Amino acid sequence: MKVDRDLCLHCGACVGMCPFNALYLDDTFLVFTDRCTNCGVCMNACPVGAISRDEPVGEGGTAAAGNTATGMIGGGGQ
Ligand code: SF4
Ligand code: SF4
């Protein structure tokens, strides 16, 4: 998983949602740890869509359900 630094508000919503305690907020940045299973919960929890999948989950097939487009989170700026 990865976070877009420009979008992240440091609100902490994703941290509270992670079932594995796999991420935390550093002073300046959101950090993902090894515990992360790429489940996507934090991604869905983020109000601004700052989190996305970094590596395509391929071989294990853990996230077979769908590789939907990441580009849909438009927003177009203000
Ligand atoms: S993808 Fe899942 S396991 Fe990884 S940090 Fe987000 S909520 Fe936690
Ligand atoms: S939920 Fe989104 S905006 Fe809030 S800390 Fe997590 S990545 Fe940043």
Image (cartoon, rainbow, N blue to C red):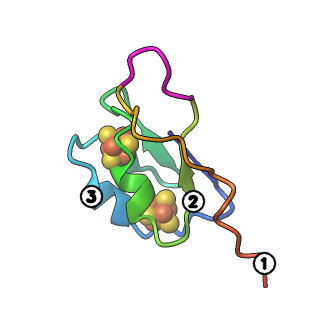
Q: Can you say whether 72 is above or below 39 in the image?
A: below
- Disc 2 CB within 8 Å of nearest ligand 2 atom: yes
Please give the name of the residue rendered at 33% of the width and 32% of the height, measured from the top-left corner: 37
Query: Residue 68, percent across and down?
Result: 56, 48
Query: Residue 69, percent across and down?
Result: 62, 50
Give the extent of the magenta segment: 56-61
- Type of residue at label 3? Met
Query: Residue 20, percent across and down?
Result: 22, 40
Gap in Å between the C-alphas at discs 3 and 2? 15 Å
Is residue 64 visible to us here?
yes
Gap in Å between the C-alphas at discs 1 and 2? 14 Å
- Type of residue at label 1? Gly
Where does label 2 land, which residue? Answer: 50
Disc nearer the start of the sequence (1/2): 2
Where does label 1 land, which residue? Answer: 77
Q: Left of 49 or right of it: where is 39? A: left
Where does label 3 land, which residue? Answer: 17
- Disc 1 CB within 8 Å of nearest ligand 2 atom: no
**Callout 3: SS:** helix
Quarter where residue 72 is shown: bottom right
Mark 1 Cα-neighbour bin, 10 Å: few <14, some 14–19, many ≥20 = few
Disc nearer the start of the sequence (3/1): 3
Query: Residue 78, percent across and down?
Result: 79, 85
Q: Left of 19 or right of it: where is 76? A: right
Q: Residue furthest left?
A: 19
- Disc 3 CB within 8 Å of nearest ligand 1 atom: yes
The secondary structure that dominates the magenta segment is: loop
